[in-house]
Image (cartoon, helix red, strand yellow):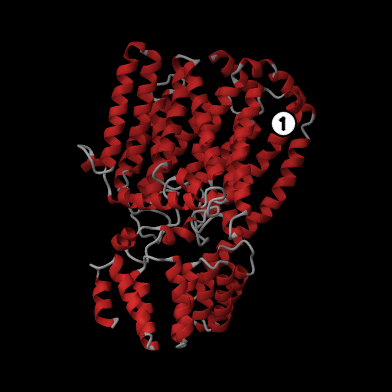
Amino acid sequence: MRDKMSTQGKNTKSGSVWFLITGVLLVTLYFNTKAYDPFNTPKLIILLITSAWLSGHIFQHYRSIYSNIHKKELLFLVIPSIFICTQLVSLLFTDLFSVGLIGDTQRRNGFMSYLALVVILIFCIIRINYHYALRIIKIAILLGFVLCIYGLMQITGNDFVSWDNPYNSMIATVGNPNFASSLLALIALICVFSLFNKQFSLVYRTIAIAVVLVSIWLIVDSQSRQGLLVMAFAVLFYLTTFIYFNYKKFRILVLVASFLLGLIAVFGMLQIGPLSPILYKDSVTVRGYYWRAAWEMFIDNPFTGIGLDRYGAYFKEYREPGYSLTYGFDITSSNAHNVYLQLFSTGGFFVGLSYLALLALIFYAGIQNIKKTNGDTQKFNLLILSTWIGFQSQAMISIDNIGISIWGWILGGCILGINLNSSDEVLNGYHKKENKLNKINLVQPLISTVLLIPIILFSYNLHKIETNTFLAKSYADVNSPQNAKTVYSYAQAVMDNLLADPYYKLLVSLYISDMGYTNEGYKSLVALHNDDPRNLDVIRVLAEYEKSIKNLDNEIYYKLKIMKLDPWNAFNYYELGLLYKQQGNINDVQKMKEKILSFAPNTDIALKAKADLN
């Protein structure tokens, strides 16, 4: 198989693959400091543009072979297509279409991002073979070198950007220490596994050693154990699988040992067993709240979910009282911190199941790639699958960050591409397909251009939303009243954009209110509330506005809405009790006090309720 795989790469057009590689590098590295969200939206834009152009290659490919497509290739096409089709159905049932389409604030995990990732996966299936997969891995090693240099600049205080973030300085190009830790871990895994493969030159292996050492240092400095856990699980899988296929006498022993080690590690993360001092963090406990809330969302909305990327709009309604008592009544989450539960809860059963089916297909193809090869070729296939396993392990406890998830989908595409493009059935007809493709080479640029034009317009709108919000914030200074018209102009551009993030609309509404456009800001807030009655941030601001003009009835009206959407907020019950007391409604005052004491009896707010709600 190795000979077939290595010679096949010479027959395939390389330009489109290099376009893919360039897109992946930009998605990983690019950020825009002039955007309100400098990381997620800019990466989404690059992802969309990359996938739009590659769609032309996919169309050209299947147009040439639709009449005699092989069963395996059809299977590899159908499963990811089902996943994105089920997402489309859930999008149509999402209560706030713009969020379902683009994604929530500082997440951008809406329909468009998954559509782009599926397109990239399918492109990898039809184009990537052993030859090109090797190129991608070599590029990943060089990428790791760049990330390490930037990471060192960050931890030594020499970052060329003065980031305003609540975390430590180690955020890499993904904006968060946990994300940075996971990204560095994935690249470090590629580097570790490449050291055992002679197909990588001494130069690449030297760089790989440096990347591994620096990455571990940076991961430790990020104070996020996520990356170390990702590396540990992936290395365990690599060693287990390698021994299983190459040392048959030790199969049972290695499987049992790996299972026990994995079990001890999982228990350690749950604060049980000897590894708990090393592996347990408070964030594990809080994730339990996120996961249980996601499960309840799914149980209540099994078919279409609560709406794509709408976890944050429902979390406070589904969170357990223990969460608010432990972490605060106002603290929330916009993601389940588990990709699989996130998809089940927001997209429903068919979205979640089709995603699991896609993962199962990739895993099976990866095992087949390892089983059918030996030597360095087998080690290379094991490298890709083990790193993909590392990605899936971090997906169990983290968010689908675009800068990281692009690598999970690329690795999955490489696994399927190698499996498909190394099969005898495909290889026998390969040259015929290439000849056919060459005859219709005008189709690809035409289709790519047709698809690229609306995507560029779409991306331009996203870019303008980000920059206008950023500029509105920059000029919004109550001590500079001369900026009022400028702020209003930028804010109006955001509010008039149908794609604008609801949170951004809320922000600019507050900016113009602070700059003197009180009526306009209020009207904008009311419009936001009408568009999304579940937006607790907007409801709270409206309640504060009614309080400022001493409209008691309207303030109670909004507080009651908060009570429905945030049933474990004792502070809101306390404020409602005070409002009822002003009305002389003693019966409802007592109800509010009893509600607080029913789930938060040992809190400071309960003491205040006992003293004030009489």
Residue 8, how many percent across, how many down?
Answer: 62, 19
Count neighbours of disc 1 (C-alpha within 10 A) and say few if under 14, some if 14 to 19, many if 20 or more.
Answer: some
Left/right placement of residue 276 relative to residue 529 reads left
In the rendered image, residue 524, in percent from the top left (x then y), is placed at 58, 75
How many numbered dots are placed on residues in this image? 1
- Residue positioned 39% across, 32% down in the render: 189
In the picture, the quarter occupied by the N terminus is top right
Above or below, 384 against 475 in this view is above
At horizontal 39% and vertical 83% (from top left) the residue drawn is 579
Is residue 29 visible to the viewer in this orientation of the structure?
A: no
Pick the residue in front: 15 or 333.
333
Residue 293 visible within the image: yes
Locate residue 428 relative to residue 169 in the image: left or right.
right
Residue projecting furthest to the top: 249
Residue located 37% across and 37% down the image: 230
Q: Secondary structure at mark 1?
A: helix
Quarter of the figure that contains the C terminus: bottom left
Q: Report which residue position mark 1 lands on.
A: 62
Left or right position of 57 against 341: right
Against 56, is 458 above or below? below
The amino acid on which the numbered mark 1 sits, given as a three-letter code, is: Tyr
Q: Position of residue 576 (x, y in %)?
A: 38, 78
Q: Quadrant of residue 197?
A: top left
Looking at the rendering, which quadrant does residue 214 occupy?
Answer: top left
Of residues 612 and 366, the one nearer the viewer is 612
- Residue 585 location, x and y as percent? 38, 85
